[in-house]
Image (tube, rainbow, N blue to C red):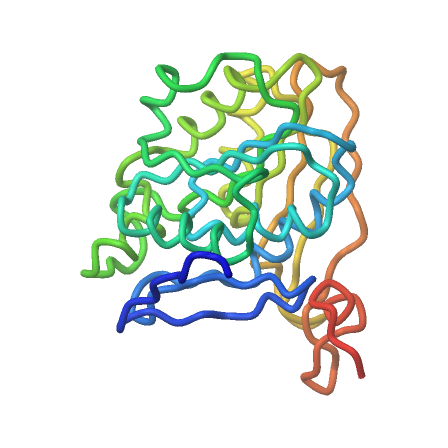
């Protein structure tokens, strides 16, 4: 029998619908959404035995899904909030991923005393979408840090990624379309060449509300715009592609 995993009164265990993987989440904190699931699917073709870094891992959902979707050799999640990092560590134990998935409780800007530069094949990140003084401010600190650039900016996430990626290493990000110019500008500035963009739409009648971006460190310029991804069909049901991503069977 394995060690019993502690689940606190304010927490719940969610089934990820993939290979019996589960995640521990705070009922009142920031819970993962479709953006994390879509990013894990967008990055699922990473090379076998890749070393992966998840910047701002939160409860570790993206890294956990990548453990189920890919043949990566090691994934490290960086999370600044100690309580959230603790949840991620317990989820690792719950899923028996200790030999593959590691959590470091640290600010991404102070990570270089623990990680070597140019040491990762792939970086994935679902950073805070809102600038520090933009959007609706949530008074719960965990939600505030998850949604707003309180402890690190968009540029910080990209700069740190450049420093930690190997030459020709791959960078995957999900963000908001209204920040696209900022994203592409910073990626070019820090030598992560944008290679693939895919817009995510709630349905065919609405504007996109997410963008998935792949970049490659020190690559030559050539950008591909992939076909749009629609979450709901005209009946309000998940599209077949979303069902496939979520492993939903009709």
Left or right, 22 with respect to 238, comes to: left
| Residue at figure coordinates x 47%, y 36% from the top left | 55
Residue sitting nearer the eye, 76 or 93: 93
Residue sitting nearer the eye, 74 or 107: 74
In the rendered image, the vertical position of residue 147 relative to residue 219, given as above or below: below
Task: Give residue 210's position: percent from left, percent from top.
Answer: 58, 54
Within the image, what quadrant is residue 238 found in? bottom right
Count how many numbered circles sit on residues in the image. Answer: 0
| Residue at figure coordinates x 51%, y 61% from the top left | 1
Within the image, what quadrant is residue 105 found in? top left
Left or right, 230 with respect to 162, comes to: right
Left or right, 48 with respect to 7, comes to: right
Image quadrant holding the C terminus, namely: bottom right
Task: Give residue 118's position: percent from left, percent from top.
Answer: 56, 13
In the rendered image, the vertical position of residue 186 relative to residue 146, given as above or below: above
Within the image, what quadrant is residue 195 found in? top right
Task: Give residue 101's position: percent from left, percent from top.
Answer: 54, 40
| Residue at figure coordinates x 59%, y 38% from the top left | 100
Task: Give residue 45's position: percent from left, percent from top.
Answer: 78, 41
**Residue extending farthest bottom:** 235
Residue sitting nearer the eye, 188 or 8: 8
| Residue at figure coordinates x 67%, y 27% from the top left | 170
In the rendered image, the vertical position of residue 144 relative to residue 102, given as above or below: below
Residue sitting nearer the eye, 166 or 135: 166
**Residue extending farthest left:** 139
């Amino acid at each position: 029998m394995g060690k019993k995993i502690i689940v606190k009164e304010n927490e719940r265990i969610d089934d990820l619908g993939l290979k019996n993987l589960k995640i521990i989440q705070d009922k009142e904190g920031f819970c993962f959404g479709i953006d994390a699931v879509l990013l894990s699917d967008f990055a699922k073709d990473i090379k076998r035995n890749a070393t992966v870094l998840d910047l701002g891992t939160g409860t570790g959902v993206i890294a956990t899904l990548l453990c189920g979707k890919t043949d990566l050799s090691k994934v490290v999640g960086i999370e600044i909030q100690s309580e959230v990092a603790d949840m991620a560590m317990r989820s690792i134990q719950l899923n028996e991923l200790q030999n593959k998935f590691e959590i470091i409780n640290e600010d991404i800007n102070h990570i270089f005393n623990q990680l070597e530069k140019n040491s990762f094949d792939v970086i994935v990140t679902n950073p805070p979408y809102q600038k520090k003084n933009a959007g609706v401010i949530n008074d719960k600190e965990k939600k505030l840090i998850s949604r707003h650039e309180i402890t690190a900016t968009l540029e910080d996430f990209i700069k740190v990624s450049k420093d930690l990626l190997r030459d020709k290493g791959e960078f995957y990000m999900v963000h908001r379309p209204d920040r696209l110019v900022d994203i592409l500008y910073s990626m070019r500035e820090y030598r992560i060449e944008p290679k693939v963009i895919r817009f995510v739409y709630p349905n065919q009648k609405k504007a996109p509300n997410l963008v998935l971006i792949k970049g490659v460190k020190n690559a030559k310029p050539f950008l591909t715009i992939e076909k749009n991804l629609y979450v709901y069909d005209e009946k309000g049901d998940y599209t077949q592609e979303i069902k496939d991503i979520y492993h939903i069977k009709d």
